[in-house]
């Protein structure tokens, strides 16, 4: 008479899949699908706020990237100030669709009503800092990858008009702040803005 042997080490395929899934979920740092709105909520800064920055700019005329340092001020919604301290002194104040540039004691005021690509790029910085996911999605196709502690957001222009100037933007950050914003221009030039610190203004 044959004796039926039971293999205690084998599990039905369905049970094995369930076991693997539960084990994966219990692993430290298990990655879950990221939601753009959740990421934006975590990194959002409230005005008034100030952040130190380091910026690299590269174009075909430069052998090495130009490095600038300074700070960003976000005094109120719709208002952003960028102050360069080295290697030269310059300030750029964005107020709605108006920009005022100060350098060497001279001021220039520009309207961006007819310069929509530049306006969108400048406003996108505020949208990122203030966590406005809807404002970004209005002008860009978004692609979010990574984990909550180390994510990357790729923004590709939706309009042909903007795409003639800007190929893409890449934003990187962690669970609390934005680390950098890379502007990749259509002609091969690029500009990387590194956010070094945030501090509420007194």
Image: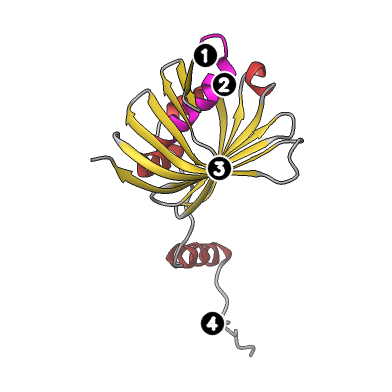
Q: Residue at x 49, y 28 (%)?
A: 124
| Dot placed on the residue nearer the N-terminal end, 2 or 4 | 4
Rendered image: mark on residue 87: 3
Q: Residue at x 54, y 63 (%)?
A: 17
Answer whether labels 1 and 2 touch (C-beta < 8 Å).
yes
Side (left or right) of 143 relative to 84: right
The crowding category of the residue bearing disc 4, from other C-alpha atoms within 10 Å (few below 14, some 14 to 19, many at least 20), is: few
What's the image's color scheme?
A: secondary structure
**Residue 106, image x and y in percent?**
48, 21
The mark closer to the camera, 4 or 3, is 3
How far apart in space, not on screen, are marks 4 and 3 (Cα)? 72 Å
| Dot placed on the residue nearer the N-terminal end, 1 or 2 | 1
| Dot placed on the residue nearer the N-terminal end, 4 or 3 | 4
Rendered image: mark on residue 112: 1
Rendered image: mark on residue 118: 2
The crowding category of the residue bearing disc 2, from other C-alpha atoms within 10 Å (few below 14, some 14 to 19, many at least 20), is: some
Which span is picked out in magenta?
Answer: 112-128
According to the picture, the residue beneath numbered tag 4 turns out to be 8
How far apart in space, not on screen, are marks 1 and 2 (Cα)? 7 Å
Compared to 23, does 166 lie above or below?
A: above
**Residue 146, image x and y in percent?**
54, 51
Q: Main secondary structure of the magenta part?
A: helix
Compared to 120, does 34 lie above or below?
A: below
Q: Is residue 194 magenta?
A: no
Looking at the rendered structure, the secondary structure element under dot 4 is loop
Looking at the rendered structure, the secondary structure element under dot 1 is loop
Compared to 101, does 36 lie above or below?
A: below
């Amino acid at each position: 008479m044959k004796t039926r042997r039971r293999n205690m080490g084998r599990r039905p395929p369905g049970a094995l899949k369930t076991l693997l899934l539960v084990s994966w979920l219990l692993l430290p740092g298990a990655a879950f699908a990221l939601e753009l709105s959740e990421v934006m909520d975590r990194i959002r800064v409230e005005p008034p706020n100030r952040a130190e920055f380091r910026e690299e700019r590269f174009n075909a005329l430069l052998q090495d990237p130009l490095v600038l340092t300074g700070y960003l001020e976000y005094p109120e919604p719709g208002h952003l100030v960028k102050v360069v301290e080295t290697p030269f002194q310059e300030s750029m104040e964005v107020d709605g669709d108006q920009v005022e540039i100060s350098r060497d004691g001279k001021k220039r005021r520009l309207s961006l009503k007819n310069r929509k690509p530049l306006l969108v790029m400048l406003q996108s910085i505020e949208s990122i800092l203030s966590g406005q996911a809807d404002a970004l999605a209005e002008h860009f196709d978004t692609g979010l990858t990574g984990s909550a502690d180390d994510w990357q957001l790729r923004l590709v222009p939706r309009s042909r008009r903007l795409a003639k100037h800007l190929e893409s933007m890449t934003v990187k950050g962690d669970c609390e702040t934005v680390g950098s914003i890379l502007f990749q221009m259509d002609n091969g030039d690029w500009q990387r803005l590194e956010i070094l610190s945030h501090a509420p203004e007194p």
